[in-house]
Amino acid sequence: MTSPCFPGRPGRFRVVALAVVLGVASLVATTGARADDIEDFEDARSAYETGNYPVSVERFEALVGGEVPRLTNPALVLESRKYLAASLLFVSREPDAERQFELLLRQDPDYQIDPVQFPTAVVDVFNRVRRRLERDLRAVREQRDREQRLARDRERQRQQRDRRRLAALRRLATTETVVERRSRMIAWIPIAGQIQNGHGGLAAALAILDGVLLATNVVSFIIHDSLPTPGTADDQPAPSEQDAATAAATASRLTNQISLGALGLSLVIGVIDAQIRFVPSRRIERQRALPPELRARFGPTSFSLTF
């Protein structure tokens, strides 16, 4: 085929090429390319820019022409294949140029060649290869999108696991466990035994019941004591009131005795319950402030716990 040429725009081409090279150099610098790889790429590109296409082909083939590219940086591999394909077209090796364009597109299906930087003949071959591979490139894009989604899902799951671990660490750091020793003597004290055992509800119920029984016992005693005493002339009720006074005395006496007995029974039941369910010790978790040597640092996509 006839070698492509650059009619009427050598200065413009050099300006655009310089801008592209600077962009590539910045990209590979941020993606970890080795200094030797960058230097070799610049030597090959220099031969291309000066029009020494056979040397350009030789140098770029040394970088990416083998079964496995010598370059390891993906950005440099893409740029090298592009320049190698253009150089191959200049030395009339169109099938090899198409092969390089195909490898380039399979690596990055969305890659575009700048029509300002390269002549029309190079862009036409590139577009022809793109059309021929359109179905394959669509599959590559779909596969790439699936892999990216899976990678994002894995990263999201990893961050969730890290957050759970961090939350667990924060709980451990902000919680202290105290062993509370219990006294057998306190278990002999009504209501206090239930409180010590951690049965607050039962302790409250017994306290209310015992209070009601004690109040009933005291009130019934006061009522009985205020009634006229039989056999005393001054306190003798009138004959018409004698039956009512006797009944009131009997009722108050029985109420006093029954309430006293029920109070005693309630106290005994409380003591027995406290003794049966007595536990010598229990563990209590208490909250505390996060120690100053532990600091949680959160970012937009990551976080860490610094010790």
Image (cartoon, rainbow, N blue to C red):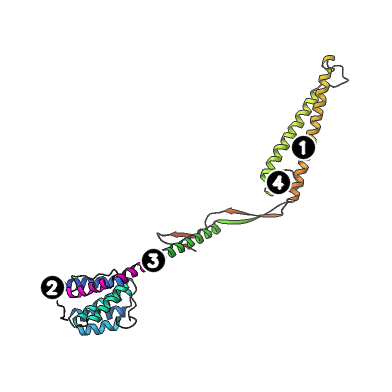
User: Is residue 85 something that shows in the picture?
Assistant: yes
Q: In this view, does 106 lie above or below 307?
A: below
Dividing the picture into quadrants, the one containing residue 202 is top right
**Range of the magenta residues?**
119-146
Left or right: 147, with 161 as reference point: left
Three-letter residue code for mark 2: Arg
Assess whether residue 257 is covered by the magenta stretch.
Answer: no
Q: Which of marks 4 and 2 is nearer the N terminus?
A: 2
- Give SS at disc 2: loop
Left or right: 302, with 63 as reference point: right
Left or right: 151, with 245 as reference point: left
User: To which residue does mark 4 refer?
Assistant: 194
User: Is residue 43 something that shows in the picture?
Assistant: no
Q: Distance between the residues labelled 1 and 3?
A: 77 Å
User: x and y percent of residue 206 in the render?
Assistant: 71, 40
Q: Which of marks 3 and 2 is nearer the N terminus?
A: 2
Q: Is residue 209 above or below residue 36?
A: above
User: To which residue does mark 2 refer?
Assistant: 9
Disc number placed over residue 263 in the picture, else none: 1
Dividing the picture into quadrants, the one containing residue 65 is bottom left
User: x and y percent of residue 303 in the render?
Assistant: 44, 61
Name the residue rendered at 25%, 85% in the picture. 58
User: x and y percent of residue 261 in the render?
Assistant: 80, 36
Compare residues 20 and 97 and report the one nearer the observer.
97
